[in-house]
Structures are given as structure tokens and as C-alpha cells.
Image (cartoon, grey):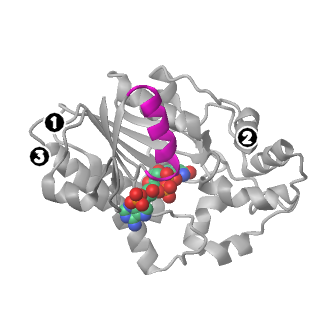
Amino acid sequence: MRVLVGGGTGFIGTALVQLLKARGHEVTLISRKPGPDRITWDELARSGLPCCDAAVNLAGANILNPLRRWNEAFQKEVVSSRLETTQMLASTISKAPQPPKTWILVTGVAYYQPSLTAEYDEDSPGGDFDFFSNLVTKWEAAARLPGDYTRQVVVRSGVVLGRGGGAIGHMLLPFRLGLGGPIGSGRQFFPWIHISDLAGILAHALEARHVQGVLNGVAPAPTTTNAEFAQALGAALGRPAFIPLPTTVVQAIFGRERAIMMLEGQKVVPRRTLATGYQYSFPKLESALKAVVA
Ligand SMILES: NC(=O)c1ccc[n+]([C@@H]2O[C@H](COP(=O)([O-])OP(=O)(O)OC[C@H]3O[C@@H](n4cnc5c(N)ncnc54)[C@H](OP(=O)(O)O)[C@@H]3O)[C@@H](O)[C@H]2O)c1
């Protein structure tokens, strides 16, 4: 298969590209910067979709970048980097003389309203209660194509655990120093997935023709709270993890609206993902974390 991957230079993209190449697929990236085996978004806009069998979009400014203040300019960038790239891919797909057979977008479980009691599967309502849920709704809408020639899949991902990036990239140093612990109350759910499984679900969705619609990209393990996650990460590193990160500190660093991503959480189950036949490599938190910190 020839697969086009928007934002494929990032944390998830690097793992996906490696897996796709190992499975014998050809990959072309879409990036803001020119380079070998890639096209730029400007080239895509100018020349239309290159010939491909499938397209995936992973592009988006990093929301949890602690060096960026949560101000209007950054909020606009977070939104436009997702909506404009997705919209451009969707529109070039629909205009292509030979459209790809599959089109996959990765969004997030922020679609579902944080709660200490509710449980969400792919059919649960959401997408209309705060900045991030509204973003997911618009993002998924931007991907929608008319007709059914191209199979459309949306993977709503939880927190991706892997080496060299993502949320855990910021957590490892304090945890290694024995300074880690729960965030805020620690009671909030922490929907997670190992990066190999997120890449695996994307490859499965590309290759298996019966897969379509929304899949939750979270592990099938019994749901984890943030405090349980902190304890498991401490155990994987052989370090204590009792020092809580207070709500006020998280809000001061990330801004109140963005801090919700860390201070609140959703209990999400991958009901449709399992029903499509995907088999997880890291269904349990302990082994997923062991692989990340090894
Ligand atoms: N990591 C997670 O835990 C997680 C969880 C849920 C959902 N997601 C979603 O999954 C997608 C990929 O996540 P990731 O962790 O792999 O992200 P990432 O490493 O931060 O970045 C993905 C790519 O997006 C492109 N990008 C960055 N800023 C951009 C901008 N302003 N305009 C256009 N493109 C931009 C970059 O590619 P170039 O520099 O080559 O242009 C970058 O390599 C994102 O949309 C993210 O929201 C991630």
C-alpha cells in the first residue's frame, strides 16, 4: 500500500511509519518542512493529492507544550493546525481522480466529558461541552467525506505512552528522581494506550477493510486512575511516587482551561476496537510502562 501520512514526523507518526515500512508499505509524509520522502502542505494545496491507497492525518501543534502559554494565539494555532490540515486532506481526497480507499484521522478522548462515574464507548455522546471537546467535534467534521468510496476511520486516542515523547516524556525526569506522584486529586481517570498499540490500531484500520467509523484508541485494561498510574510508573522505575502535583501548580503552568486535560479524565472503553478484531500488544499498564522505561 502507498500511504500518505500528514504530521508523520512526530511522536506517533515516527512509530507508525516504522511499523508500516516493516509491514511492507510505502510511506510519503506531509510536513511543513521539505525533505526526502515527503511533500509539504503547500505542495499538497498546489498540486493535489499524490497517487496513494490510503491517507492518515496526525498533524497538530503540541497541546501540552509547557513552554507555550495558553493564550489566544496558541489556542488558534492548536485549532487551525488540526482543522486546516484535515480539511485540506479531505478536500484533496474528494477531488482526486483516483481517491484513496482509506482515510484515517487521529483525534482524542477529550471528546467525552470528564467524569468520575460515567463510562464511554465509541457510541457515547460528547463533543459539545468545553474547548477540547468542541475542537474534536470540528476536527472530525472537517475529515468527513461525501459518499462511501473511501473508507473513513477516526481513532480517538487516550494518552499515548512511549519512549521519547508525549506526556510521559515530561514526567520521566521527576519520577526518576523520586519526585513524581499523582496530579491534583489523583482520582481522575487516566485513559492510556501504548504507542505500539496506537500504531497497531492504525495499521489494522488501514489493512482490514471491514473497519470503519470511530474506534477508541485506549488500552482494554481495567480503567486506571491518575494515582494508580503514578504508582505504577514509580514501581516500573523502582522509585517512590508519593509527591502530589497540586492543582494550583498545574493550573499556573498550563492555564485553567488546558489544565483540565491533566486534572480531569474519562473512563473510556475500546468496545468497537476490540470488536473489529484488534489484538493488543500491551493490554496491561505494568507491562506497557516496563517497555517504556526499559
Ligand atoms: N500524543 C498523545 O498522547 C496524543 C493523544 C491523543 C491525540 N493525539 C493527537 O495525535 C496527533 C499526533 O500526536 P503526536 O503526539 O504525534 O504529535 P506531535 O509529535 O506533537 O506532532 C505531530 C506533527 O504535527 C505537525 N505540526 C506541529 N505543529 C504544527 C502546526 N502548527 N501546523 C501544522 N502541523 C504541525 C509536526 O509535523 P511537521 O513539523 O513535519 O510539520 C509534528 O511532527 C495530534 O493531532 C494529537 O493531538 C496525541
Foreground: disc 2 or disc 1: 2
- Rendered position, 149 above or below 136: above
Q: Is residue 211 visible?
A: no
Report x, y in % for residue 84: 29, 61
Residue beneath label 3, please?
95
Q: Secondary structure at mark 1?
A: loop
Please name the amino acid that badge 3 sits on: Lys
Q: Report the quarter where the C terminus lies.
A: top right
Along the polypeptide, which appears first: circle 2 or circle 3? 3
Q: Which residue occupies 44% across, 22% down?
A: 276
Report x, y in % for residue 248: 72, 75
In front of the other: 38 or 148: 38
Q: Is residue 179 left or right of residue 51?
A: right
Q: Secondary structure at mark 3?
A: helix
Q: Which residue occupies 46% across, 44% down?
A: 156
Q: Which residue occupies 51% across, 29% down?
A: 271
Magenta residues, start to end: 9-24
Q: Specify few, some or many for label 2: CA neighbours under 10 Å numbering under 14, 14-19, or 20 or more.
A: many
Residue beneath label 2, please?
289
Residue beneath label 1, please?
147
Q: Report the quarter where the N terminus lies.
A: top left
Along the polypeptide, which appears first: circle 2 or circle 1? 1
Q: Secondary structure at mark 2?
A: helix
Residue furthest toward the left?
97
Please name the amino acid that badge 2 sits on: Leu
In front of the other: 288 or 113: 288
- Rendered position, 177 above or below 223: below
In front of the other: 188 or 76: 76
Does the CB distance between marks 2 and 3 fall below 8 Å? Answer: no
Q: Specify few, some or many for label 1: CA neighbours under 10 Å numbering under 14, 14-19, or 20 or more.
A: few
The answer to whether the residue bearing label 1 lies less than 8 angstroms from the nearest atom of ligand 1 is no
